[in-house]
Amino acid sequence: MTTTSESWRVVCQDPGDGSGDLIVELPSELLEQLGWGLGDELTVEAEEENICLKLKQRAEAPSS
């Protein structure tokens, strides 16, 4: 079985609040391609020279 992966480079931004957190703005094209949206929960895995984001849980759809 062969799998291919695509790499995206983004810039980490300091929110400037002293929290030590980082803001990573993901390109809308990437979010659309992956089917990710606002409120989805992601996991972060540090690799040698990369950080891997994976979908952990989808945001619940608003109830009508």
Image: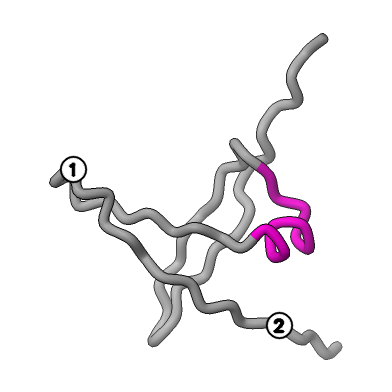
Circle 2 is placed at which residue position?
Answer: 5
Does label 2 or label 1 sit earlier along the sequence? 2
Q: Residues within 10 Å of mark 2 (few under 14, many from 20)?
A: few
Prevalent SS, magenta region: helix
User: Marks 2 and 1: which is nearer the front?
Assistant: 1
Task: Work out which residue is located at the far left of the displayed protein and give it.
Answer: 18
Please, what is the three-letter code of the amino acid marked with disc 2? Ser
Which residue is found at the position 52% from the left and 70% from the top? 52
- Left/right placement of residue 19 relative to residue 13 reads left
Q: In this view, does 59 lie to the left or right of 43?
A: right
The quarter of the picture where residue 26 lies is bottom right
Residue 8, above or below 14: below
Q: Is residue 56 covered in magenta?
A: no
Viewer-closest of 8 and 51:
8
Q: Where is residue 48 in the image (x, y as percent from the top left)?
A: 39, 86
Q: Do the residues labelled 2 and 1 touch (CB within 8 Å)?
A: no
Mark carried by residue 9: none
Mark 1 neighbour density, 10 Å: few (under 14) some (14–19) many (20 or more): few
In this view, which residue lies farthest toward the bottom? 2
At 61% from the left and 63% from the top, the residue drawn is 27
Q: Percent position (x, y) of residue 28?
A: 67, 58
Above or below, 21 against 51 in this view is above
Secondary structure category for the residue under label 1: loop
For badge 1, the amino acid type reads Asp
| Image coords of residue 4 (percent x, y) | 76, 86
Residue picked out by circle 1:
17
Q: Which residue is drawn at 62% across and 39% down?
A: 38
Q: Going 86% across and 88% down the picture, which residue do you hit?
A: 1
Q: What element carries label 2?
A: loop
**In the image, which residues are magenta?**
28-37
